[in-house]
Image (cartoon, grey):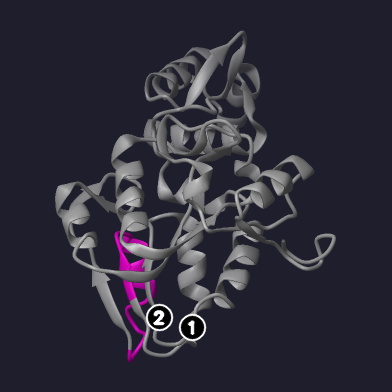
Amino acid sequence: MLAVERRKLILEKVHQEKKVIVSELSKEFGVSEETIRRDLDRLADEGHVIKSYGGAVINEIGSIDLPFNIRWKANSLGKKKIAELINREINDGDHIFLDASTTAVFIAKTIKQKKKLTVITNSIENLLELADVSGWDIISTGGLLKQGTMSLTGKRAADTIERYNADKVFFSCKGIDLEKGVTEGSDETASIKQSMMASARKVYLTVDSTKFDKVGFSNICKLSKIDVVVTDKKPEDKWMQIFKELDIQCIYPKDEKGEGL
């Protein structure tokens, strides 16, 4: 196994279990503990983990956007639930923005029965997913391909977004916090989402339950800038209270202790 493949598997493991142990990884991959320590050193340098005695823990406030294949596996069931809820929010003929989150790909998979949609996206995966849909206008933002994330960023992408006026934007984030608001892993990712928000009439934050009370490196917006939060489980009472105070609609599955606010 190549070192890069091993590090990718270690990164997946640390995001699933929140921590890893050097001795356990050494046995699992059949390499020396020194090799595993070098792998963890590399992941720590890249901002993915924080080294601890005998292993490493996940870096919850990293400034690095995770590779698409790792984000895709994180709470996929929750993202599917969110996509099903979003399907009810999109009408035939809508003009929408979809960001480059993995949640957006689940949305793209779910809304294909809609008619005459216009979708503007900076996601390579969204473009591929919707390539065979007829009767829609699919618009790529263009821009700089960000390695590993399957996203298009930069000034060209932002300029394209600002040319349009959409009915709705659906975007995700790295964390949502009562004090810090909505945050992302990097400035370039956050800025694209800000551009989409500024060009949309209604702002939907699609955030699975694992993102609550988490803070990313870069600020996207204050909570007050969000119109609707769509999530896979009913948030805690403190969140429901702040949503009520800020007049933010919260949508979650009906089987999660009642209907959305």
Residue 172 on image: x %, y %: 48, 52
Residue 35 on image: x %, y %: 46, 18
Magenta segment includes 131: yes
* In the image: residue 258, left or right of residue 131: right
The residue range painted magenta reads 119-135
Disc sitting over residue 91 in the figure = 1
* Up/down of 234 relative to 48, above or below: below
Q: CA distance from mark 1 to mark 2?
A: 6 Å
Task: Depth check: give the residue in front, 49 or 153.
Answer: 153
Q: Are the residues tagged 1 and 2 within 8 Å (C-beta)?
A: yes
Q: Report if residue 32 is visible in the image.
A: no
Helix, strand or loop for disc 2: loop
The amino acid on which the numbered mark 1 sits, given as a three-letter code, is: Asn
Residue 232 on image: x %, y %: 68, 58
The residue labelled by disc 2 is 94
Disc sitting over residue 137 in the figure = none
How many numbered marks does the figure carry? 2
Residue 5 on image: x %, y %: 42, 38
Mark 2, Cα crowd under 10 Å, few <14 / some 14-19 / many 20+, is some
